[in-house]
Image (cartoon, rainbow, N blue to C red):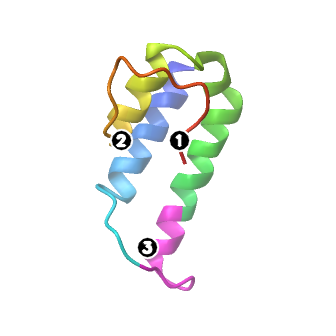
Amino acid sequence: MLSFSICVIAMKWTLIGKYKQGKLQVQSLAYVQWWLVDRAVALWEAWIGKFFLDTPVLNTFYIVMGAKINMAATLNSFIT
């Protein structure tokens, strides 16, 4: 669980960095990078994240991924 979580975080920061608002063409490298990270996060949520709903671990994962949420927040669903 820990190693896959670290791989997803590293993939996000390596391929995308900080998300920027805008439109992407489907035939662009930026879209492929976004798609790969989106699929990795979806796999993480399906395999690992479901065990951490309503826990600080889920908050920590999203904060490390770049979301601006409070650690005291209760997340009973995933952020997309």
Dot label at residue 67: 2
| Residue with the mark numbered 1 | 79
Label 1 element class: loop
- The amino acid type found where label 2 is placed reads Ala
Report if residue 48 is visible in the image: no
Label 3 element class: helix
- The amino acid type found where label 1 is placed reads Ile
Compare marks 3 and 2 and give the one earlier in the sequence.
3
Residue range (magenta): 23-34
Report if residue 23 is visible in the image: yes
Instruction: Find residue 19 and report its horizontal and vertical position in percent.
Output: 34, 59
Residue at x-position 41% and y-position 22%: 73
| Quadrant of the frame with the N terminus | top right
Q: Is there CB contact under 8 Å for labels 1 and 2?
A: yes
Instruction: Find residue 32 and report its horizontal and vertical position in percent.
Output: 53, 70
| Residue with the mark numbered 3 | 30
Residue 55, magenta (yes or no) = no
Residue extending farthest to the top is 55
